[in-house]
Image (cartoon, helix red, strand yellow):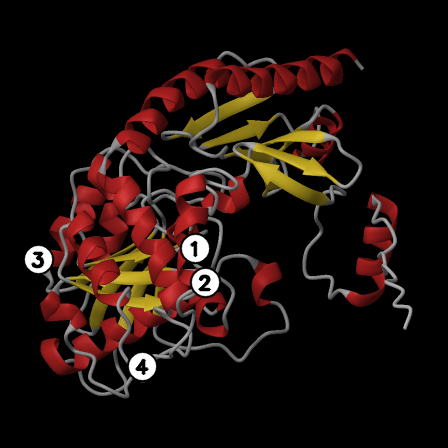
Amino acid sequence: MLHIRVAFMSPKITTASALEMEKGALTRNYNPLPVVAAKAKGAWITDVEGKKYLDCLAAYSAVNFGHGNKTLIKAAKRQLDRVTLTSRAFHHDALGPFAKELADLLGMDMVLPMNSGAEAVESAIKVARAWGYRVKGVPAGKAKIIVAENNFHGRTISIVSFSSDESSRKDFGPFTPGFVKVPYGDAEALEKAMDDSVVAVLLEPIQGEAGIVTPPKGYLKAVRTITKAHNVLFIADEIQSGLGRTGATVQCQNEKVTPDMYILGKALGGGIVPVSAVVGTADVMGVLKPGQHGSTFGGNPLAAAVGLAVVRMLAKGDIQKRSQRLGKHLLKRLQSLVGKGVLEVRGAGLWAGIDIDPSLATGREVCEALMARGVLAKDTHGSTIRLAPPLVVSKKDLDWGIDQLEAVLAQMRAQ
């Protein structure tokens, strides 16, 4: 019998064909730059036509350790051959080491593993409310959590309930009660908002989506002092700022502040799988009892194996030092662009927010011009662009990327 092997080849994907398929089938909840990634390595992304781009977003800090990090890929592949999912109905051998070493890394006691950052924020809110009722003694249904204006903690209903971004809120009500907004960076306003029903203060140590907004010096210490004085929990959302991005394991360490709970996500999954966690003290995290909160995939074997590899990488401290060193160089070079199309630069470590002169261009227009020159960045709030390259980026490549921004601004000024 004659056997004929027929190879069925998918038609070659081009940028145009990929965008056309997305246009017909994909919900339009994003407006991405027209780049179609096919592969990536380190700090570089290659599109379907073979053009290379310097990644200066790192998936909003989810790819802190670079695309295709060999250590993390090895950990994932090893776990794929063993067991990937059991649910939390059973134990597995990666979960204990992951939880223990992550807690130790942050000087905390207990870990609540979840999947996405928004899930971890929701989990922290639930823990804080339970603590408020069961430990602090707040009357049932009266717990309040203070948040900052212009925050970004995710897009679930509870989270957008306290968002300042109208596009995140419009047509999504009714909203979850129990949240009070105060100006970011204003310790006096925070103090005035305190009363006996407040159970927690939820803040980003640096506001990412708002444009890498850094608070005044001493603000986080003031928040810690105020929360302790009023028997209120301090929850630090380090989903974007944490895990090496700002030159420390978490930004709170740069400010010499220890909250009651950290919220982690993004880079905890190494750019391979979604992994998030709430990490806190035993007297706070211990309020949860079996059956009161959970997740089918939270803390799954594959996630725990990758997360453990991330924790062990961070425990060495090298990536944080690199971020700190290159970050100083990045900010120094960006500061030289102030007055040349740039109004202000903010940042910490390898994370920068750049306010473009709105009379020159929008943030989107600058990002599109950068894309044409082989650099991928993201705009926010009209005229601000964000730079957050993988922490493995070389100094040479980083300089090249800044050169492209300088060239784009010069070209726009000349027009």
Choose mark 3 or mark 1, whichever is in front.
1
Question: Mark 2 belongs to which amino acid?
Answer: Leu
139 lies above or below 163: below
Disc marking residue 76: 1
Q: Residue 125 lies in what quarter of the image? A: bottom left
Task: Work out whether residue 321 or residue 218 is closer to the camera in this orientation and state it.
Answer: 321
Q: Are marks 1 and 4 in contact (CB under 8 Å)?
A: no
Tell me the distance, in whole angstroms, between the alpha carbons under discs 1 and 4.
Answer: 27 Å
Task: Work out whether residue 222 or residue 266 is closer to the camera in this orientation and state it.
Answer: 266
Q: Residue at x 68, y 56 (%)?
A: 30
Q: Which residue is mark 3?
A: 229
Task: From the top left corner, tell me how far across and down residue 189 is, in percent.
Answer: 27, 52
- 126 vs 340, left or right, is left
Choose mark 1 or mark 4, whichever is in front.
1
> SS at mark 3?
helix
Q: Which residue is mark 4?
A: 293
Question: Mark 1 belongs to which amino acid?
Answer: Ala
Q: Are marks 2 and 4 in contact (CB under 8 Å)?
A: no
Tell me the distance, in whole angstroms, between the alpha carbons under discs 2 and 3.
Answer: 48 Å
Q: Residues within 10 Å of mark 1 (few under 14, many from 20)?
A: many
Q: Residue 263 lies in what quarter of the image? A: bottom left
Question: Mark 3 belongs to which amino acid?
Answer: Ala
Question: Mark 4 belongs to which amino acid?
Answer: His
Badge 2 or badge 4: first in the primary sequence: 2
Disc marking residue 80: 2
Q: Are marks 2 and 1 in contact (CB under 8 Å)?
A: yes
- 70 vs 107, left or right, is right
> Is residue 64 at least partly visible in the picture?
no
Q: Residue 252 lies in what quarter of the image? A: top left
Q: Are marks 3 and 1 in contact (CB under 8 Å)?
A: no
Q: The C terminus lies in which quarter of the figure? A: top right
Tell me the distance, in whole angstroms, between the alpha carbons under discs 3 and 1.
Answer: 44 Å
